[in-house]
Amino acid sequence: MKSIILQNLHDVQYRIQNAEQQYGRVAGAVKLLAVSKTQSAEKIRLAYEAGQQLFGENYLQEALAKQMKLTDLAIEWHFIGHIQSNKTKLLAEHFSWVHTVSRAETAIRLSKQRPHHLPPLNVCIQVNISGEQSKDGILPDQLTELARQIINLPNLSWRGLMTIPAPTADKTEQHRQFAELRLLFESLKVNYPTLDTLSMGMSADLEAAIAEGATIVRIGTAIFGERE
Ligand SMILES: *Cc1c(COP(=O)(O)O)cnc(C)c1O
């Protein structure tokens, strides 16, 4: 198991470096977030020992249970799942980043509940670019209003945007969706120049995401194998 995870991590890092080079990105501009949902604490430990430090989780209770087993490691924990409004306190206490903020009330709660001994909680706004009704995320035309409400919250650091596009094997369509998020990001940067994060790209489409400006790619399957 150890050698497979090690090999997979190397392969993913290689894909990232290649894409950075191919698409004219600065070397090292793209961070790798290892998505460990449904994977064991033991596997996370192996990936950490291989040099991986950023891990993303989707389910709060599952994440907390694994965090308890890994307190000896300097992992940076990112929450990338659906936010239930009665769970914001635990998110504010146990994560460095939350990628999936899409409502002002959630942001306000996270800021209020962030413990004062911790640095500000880094957040991204999740955007629903495909406009599918079933999906989490704010619609693009509501983004400026949410930005205005989030920017001054004292215990949050709003870093940028995140999206989960409609899955497609069509490369042109992958690029088109990621480019849409990048355009929104660039127009926000006019008013909010400190924004520095575009969280987009998964195992199947990280190259397209990097071509369109991703700064964090969220990779599960390509590191840990298929989820059960
Ligand atoms: C599961 C998940 C990923 C990782 O997807 P893979 O295809 O396994 O790389 C990335 N982002 C989010 C939000 C996820 O839920």
Image (spheres, rainbow, N blue to C red):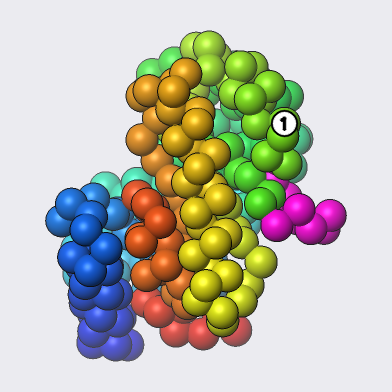
Q: Mostly what secondary structure, the magenta segment?
A: loop
If the image is split into quadrants, where does the C terminus sit?
bottom right
Which amino acid type is marked by label 1?
Answer: Gln
Residue that label 1 marks:
142
Q: Is residue 34 above or below residue 92?
A: below
Task: Report which quarter residue 227 is drawn in.
Answer: bottom right
Q: Tell me what residue is drawn at x 66 percent, y 51 percent.
A: 129
Q: Is residue 73 above or below residue 2?
A: above
Q: Tell me what residue is drawn at x 54 percent, y 48 percent.
A: 181
Count of marks overlaid on the render? 1
Please tell me which residue lies in front, 1 or 152. 152
Q: In the picture provided, is 178 more to the left or to the right than 135?
A: left
| Chain part drawn in magenta | 130-138
Q: Residue 52: horizontal and vertical position, in percent?
A: 26, 62
Q: Residue 66: horizontal and vertical position, in percent?
A: 47, 59
In the picture as drawn, the residue positioned furthest to the right comes out as 133
Q: In the picture provided, is 163 more to the left or to the right than 137?
A: left
